[in-house]
Image (cartoon, rainbow, N blue to C red):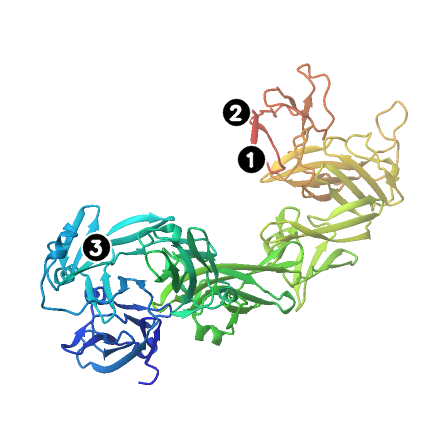
Amino acid sequence: PPGFVESSCRSRIFWMKLNQLLLQGKFFQLEINDPYAGPVLLDEKLASRCGYVLSEDVWGNPVFRASVLGCHVANEADELFSLTVNIKVSSFSSMRAAVTYTYPMYCSYSSWASREIVCEENYMEVSVKTDVPAVSNDYTVAWMSALPETQNVAYQLWQLMFVSPSGRKRITVSDAAKLGYSFNNTLSRVYLRAPYHSNESDVSMVSGVNMNMITSTSMYRQRWLLLLIDTTVSCPVDGISFTDTTLTWTVPSVIPTLVVQESTFLSKNILMGVDGQVIVNPEEKNYLLEHKKTHIEITIPIGAEGGKLKSSISDGVYGVIYSIDLFLEHTWTDADWQTTKYTVVKSITTPFMPQIPTVINNTLPEERLFNVAFGHFLPDVSLVAIAIGNVPFTLREAQHHGFKIYETLFSNRTKGFVLEVSFDDPYVLKEYVNRNETKYTLLVNYTISVGPEMTLYYHSAEVECAIADIELPEAVGYCDEENLYLAIPLFGLHQYWDLYLGNKLLNRHVALTNGYLAATNSTHLILQMPLFAVGVIYEEVSFQKIKARFDVALRKVRTMETLQMFSVSCSFNSSAFIICHPDGTIMISAQMKTVPAIDMSKTKLRDSSCKPREYNEGHAFFKFHVTTCGTSVRFEGDHIIYENEISYEKETLPGQSIPTITRDPHYRLTVLCYYRAKETLVLGAFASDPSTSPPFGSGTMVPRSNIAVYRRIRQALNVVSRVSKDESFVEFYEPNMAILKRLVEPVFLEVELKDESPNTELYLENCWVTRSLDFNSTPRWNITVDG
């Protein structure tokens, strides 16, 4: 078929190339057409003996090369040469039903040197120009005494003598053929062809290169003539070296076995070629051809024109292999030979070179679009599938989903695969970071097919991009006569951030427990906090006026980092209130509605020295600590209750204990403060964490009537605790003063029951210290255990 076969004559070698595209899925064989015996199947043994090479070029095309001195080449006067090859193609490995294409090749070559040596991939060949005398039937033995080594040379037969480290060996041409050699003569030449590493060969190092050498003499006797022809041949078997960027091929310039009189050696010409074509100006292709004193070097950049880079996988690692077909032709003269043309054909392939693919992040934050290029790959690599966020997609499925995938070319003749994914795609991971940024993470797994073998290779990548696309919410606060309000935008709530009241998550349960009302509309969460609800902070408390504040912290969901505080602060007019501070301070604005009215300046607490701080005709304002003014304490369930009483001090005559006759009413107002036991501050001189905001207690004022039947017996216990400075219990620390104690130092604690009831006794069971306000928190240091 057209384009199937391409052939040429390059110097003294037939070159034929088959188009591998037309052989895909098929099998082929080559037959050499023998003019006398018919077709002969080409195999390795025949190829090396007869001067044939069957290999592939770097592109995978089958290549057949043949010497013009090959076994089946028709030779016309050592100038015109022809060879016919049969190409058999079949769809079956057994070659049944094969189609045969007969292809003749022709070559013209007349510029023979006195000696020509060809070093091919699988054979070495030397041909020497000589005039072989015509064969005569006359016989004489007069010359036989000249050389003892030739006395047994058969008449009118060529014989070969090999010299090797093991000694000399003389064999006939037919016996040499059995050993894989090929010897023959043409009209004007004698040639010897030999395989590499035969028993008669030797390996020696020349200028750092191992040379395979066969030292031989071809002998022919006729009449008075004894013809001895030096058919020694030597070819390099290595000389290849690699770096990360180049390969270097080294061939000795002077080979001692081929140049006996080295002083007469003169290099005439050096040519290099690629894929059988002579490169006239190597530097134009970035090749470097150097003739040094002892050797010739050809340096090729890896990936250079004329060769081929091929993708490969080794142990799960992606890499490349570079191959190039080179040849070197060196022509020289010396005293023994007029001219020698030395040709070496070499196919070079680098070792596997790992090339870890790179992920190039060309993400466009302003367009909210991931743009990721995955490369650099050779043309023999294709993308077959991806997985986004561990969800697999074929390329068709990926395109259908909305991912954009396409190839891009790079300047170094490689390619990459570009993937575009929107930040808003559901398979993109999103994380709230910093104050107002979202970190978008694209997790992608690539599956690529490598080379004609379609080996699968997997590579994962993670691409991140953080952009400031989150606007922190701004709360609006306001108040009415009895409540504080905060209106907080719903955007991002519970997704990016939560609301905290102190260290507690402000959820529906906490809101209901604290007496808040929470309502939402389409855009905002509205919190309503009664003035005396838990969590309200009283900034200023004065006579008939309260300045209250309510704080809510906006914290990140995952890290609980506080981003900002939402606060609402208002001033309230209130005629009657009780405020129980977390530090044990109680503030009371008591309204005394009595008939007749009483003098508010004469009101007092249980301790008569505790007078109102401010008062007017109908109100009195008290401020005291739960450990003073006769305040009693008792426990009910999980609450601690502190109780005091506001009463009116009636006038008495001097020196008398009975009141004067007065119209003042008998009036008492009971004051109660409730604290949760597990949240109450320890009353004493222990350090507490200043960063915490302990809850306020709740208070109640119970007016007492002057009618006796409504009196009730109170079971409150007045218990006071304090810490002494030493074992004398004479000097005590002030309440709420921080005390630094080492773990091994004693603590002198006094707990006193001030109740005078004879039926009450005090037992101290357990006493301990914690780092926080929570009695059950850890770590915990015991002071007393079981009394």
The x, y position of residue 294, in whole percent, is: 42, 51
Judge left or right: residue 324 versus residue 365: left
Amino acid found under the numbered disc labelled 2:
Asp
Instruction: Give the residue number, with chain letter if any, for mark 2.
Output: 786
SS of the residue at dot 3? Answer: loop
Where is residue 57 shown, x and y percent of the image? 35, 69
**Relative to 651, 178 lies left or right:** left
Residue 356 in view, yes or no = no
Pick whichever of labels 1 and 3 is earlier in the sequence: 3
Residue depicted at x 42% and y 56%: 296
- In the displayed structure, would residue 707 be above or below residue 196? above
Q: Nearer the viewer, mark 1 or mark 3?
A: 3
- Quarter of the image with the C terminus in it: top right
- Closer-to-camera residue (593/221): 221
What residue did someone put label 3 on? Answer: 198
Q: Is residue 668 above or below residue 442?
A: above
Mark 2, secondary structure of its residue: loop
